[in-house]
Image: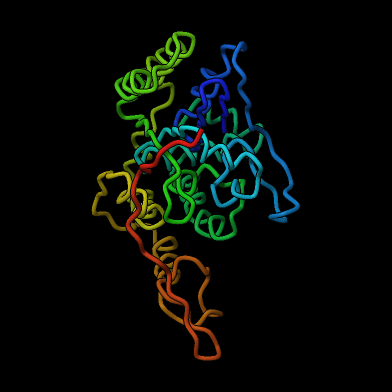
Amino acid sequence: MIIDHDLRLVLLHVPKCAGTALRRAFMEDNSRDVVSLFDFQYSTVLQRQVDLAHMPLMDLRHFQEWKFLNRYRVIACIRHPYQRLASACREFLRQKNRESQIQMTRTPPTKDQMLAYLRRLPSAMDAHDLRWVHGFPIHWFTHYGKQPKVDHLIRCEHMQSDLDMLAQTLDLPTSLRQPLRKVAQVESHQEAISLKGLSGDPNLQSLANILHRQDFRCFNYKRNQTSFDDPELKDLMERCLKVGPSHELPLTNLTPQMRWYWGRSSTKSDQLLRATRNRNIRS
């Protein structure tokens, strides 16, 4: 997360959506008052570790910086869920250990590595385990519940035109426009390691269709009709998506309805989210 007090702007850092490059662009001009939330920290309120760089808004709500989401203009960069999940898989392996990090600089994840990652992602999401933060849904970083907290979205798919429009709409200074233009040029042409094969895998796409369902609908991304060809992953998701007694379900947050021992049940909400908000900025 970046807070530019001089420009009254907040950049929400959605993982694997060019956030690091955008962060550097905002930090390049040290004459402005820019605050960068970064690194890891144990939250005594949440009673768990948090990643300050990529904080879901359900976590950020408990930090004092939350107030700037209501006072300033808020921007975020997003990406197609298939491409983003493939990149998240590579990032997880890059951070796993030194050997895995070296491999990721040379080759994409193998099929077995990808499947191992996909099989564990649902439970990691269920537990909000920050080691898997790069694979959390986009809307966790842009919405508080059903409320969008972003005013302007930048899409990786056409970053140059979106950044140009943003600069014009917000009348950004030249000291920021130039670094942002460089970001767009680099991100548009940077393909050191192709993830095309990974993002096209039917298991990755099928899992993204389930875990990131709200992202496709909210941000109007195209979703392919795919099915699992990995029996283990297919069986896991079928069990997770069942309606049944609480203690028979492998996870708690994917089932459409969980039934409790005393005859009560709790139903998962399925609301269509708006991508951005419309509101007047308070001075």
Task: Determine the image quadrant of residue 272.
Answer: bottom left
Residue lying furthest bottom in this view?
262
* Nearer the observer, 89 or 26: 26
Q: Position of residue 108 (x, y in %)?
A: 45, 33
Q: Is residue 31 above or below residue 92?
A: above
**Left or right: 188, with 105 as reference point:** left
Rendered residue at 72%/42% (across/down) = 41
In which quadrant will I find the N terminus?
top right
Q: Nearer the viewer, residue 190 or 279?
A: 279
Question: In the picture provided, is 68 more to the left or to the right than 224?
Answer: right
- At 72% from the left and 49% from the top, the residue drawn is 43
| Residue 203 vs residue 258, the one in the foreground | 258
Please say if 25 is above or below 229: above
Residue farthest along the front direction in this orientation: 283
Q: Quadrant of residue 227?
A: bottom left
| Picture coordinates of residue 72, whole percent (x, y) | 50, 33
Count the marks.
0
Residue 46 sits in which quadrant? bottom right
Above or below: residue 39 compared with residue 111: above
Q: Position of residue 62 (x, y in %)?
A: 64, 50
**How was this image coloured?**
rainbow
Residue at the spot 34% in from the left edge and 39% down from the top edge: 80
As displayed, is residue 187 above or below residue 154? above
* Residue 182 screen position, x and y as percent: 42, 12
The residue lying at 53 percent from left, 71 percent from top is 250
